[in-house]
Image: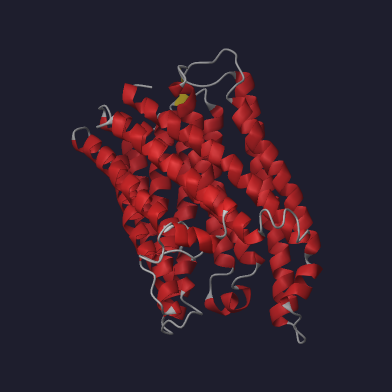
Amino acid sequence: MKYESQSVAKLYFIAAIGLFVGQIVFGLVMGLQYVMGDFMFPEIPFNVARMVHTNLLIVWLLFGFMGASYYLIPEEAETELHSPMLAKLMFWVFLVAGALTILGYLLVPYSTLAEMTGNSLLPTMGREFLEQPTITKIGIVIVALSFLYNVGFTVLKGRKTVITLVLLIGLAGLAIFFLFSFYNPDNLVKDKFYWWFVVHLWVEGVWELIMASILAFVLIKTTGVDREIIEKWLYIIIAMALITGLIGTGHHFFWIGAPEYWLWWGSIFSALEPIPFFMMTVFAFNMVNKRRINHPNQPAVLWALGTAVMAFLGAGVWGFMHTLAPVNYYTHGTQITAAHGHMAFYGAYVMIVLAIISYAMPLLRGRKACNSAASQVAEMWSFWLMTISMVFITLFLTGAGILQVWLQRFSDEPMSFMVVQDKIELFYWLREGAGVVFLIGLLLYVYSFFIGGEERTVEEKV
């Protein structure tokens, strides 16, 4: 750690991992509710477990992005953070607001929560992934603006690099597109049209810039490759990501009553979306092959390479599998969508946050470069347990989705939804088993940071 103010990132990283564990626990609860419908009912109904699962995902990733920014921007800008106190204050505001919101989901009926939080004054609740009370959304905006102010002024007073530029564009886009969550028109088509401006333009737009900039930073630090080479790759990748991601929003407009031309625009640009992810894979492996140093933090390098590969598979390949309009006509809203969503989120965003935590946390805890050899072995085991189990979760959901499409939508005598759910129950049990393995891998990741021992130092590559 070069700058004292980077230490604020530690708070964000710890909270992110804690919330990540919570997210997976509620995912397992949901998985059991798929096959045991009355599991934990009425204490935690399925709709509540799903809200908590998806909201925790969003919140812990935001904590991770903020922690990553607070760690890398002082180092890139070569100056202390503009206001460490503001960073710590906003951390506690965000954490308390998030915790109260989750408790609200769990302890009171959703309609009662809407009444308690004044949703009638500015109705924003009730939409998938954006279920947060209006007062929580306002809190998120305040936290995001404070965060942008803090990192923006840090960059302004220090060195400007391509990594900080791309990161700031991504973070600004994150804040701007979230404002569409406050627009809740009565017309359902308009509602879904603008709803995707948050959900899609986050995960298939500006979040990709955040991911690419964090990946570039980790690769610079762990490979010693010239910054100019990495920055040229970064420009090309983010240009392709923005062009395909922004117009590719149209693949969500196929069946909501939007104009017919979205069938073409959405299909064509969605078909191009795997390209930046493939470029990211080539980029990551190229940089590691050209490395000038043998960095002792092997798990951080492994997570960085894993990010590129799994993002390409989850967001690129599995996204492309069902994004063309003639295919999506049958697969829309099936378990194939869930398969794509799980692997894409894990590959593109979960893994890059774990990569920056793996790189930065040993330094934040006073080590020179990395955790001990025993700790790294445990962490690499956690990498393989989580990654392989996510591959199987994706494959099981894909199998369920293909069978669901055939039995429910394509066959000569389509079956009803619930009958089909019984037919694909085996896949849900297999998915649950893989989820348990994933949780074991995550707990091993946490445990790896508490394993002591001596560390190695950075060596020049001969």
Which quadrant of the figure has residue 11? top left
Residue nearest the observer in this picture, 408 or 35? 35
Write the residue at 41% across / 57% down.
Answer: 202
In the picture, measured across the screen, residue 11 lies left or right of residue 86, that is right
Q: In this view, does 205 lie above or below 222?
A: below
Q: Residue 442 in the image: state x and y as whole percent.
A: 63, 37
Image mark count? 0
Residue nearest the observer in this picture, 28 or 346? 28
Q: Residue 100 in the image: state x and y as whole percent.
A: 49, 46
Q: In this view, does 81 lie above or below 332?
A: above
Looking at this view, name the residue that lies furthest to the left. 157
Q: Residue 381 in the image: state x and y as whole percent.
A: 67, 32
Q: Residue 91 in the image: state x and y as whole percent.
A: 39, 37
Write the residue at 33% across / 42% down.
Answer: 231
Residue nearest the observer in this picture, 232 or 189? 189
Which quadrant of the figure has residue 2? top left
Mark yes or no: residue 104 visible.
yes
State the scheme by which the image is colored. Answer: secondary structure
Position of the N terminus, as image quadrant, is top left
Mark yes or no: residue 285 visible.
no
Write the residue at 65% across / 51% down.
Answer: 27
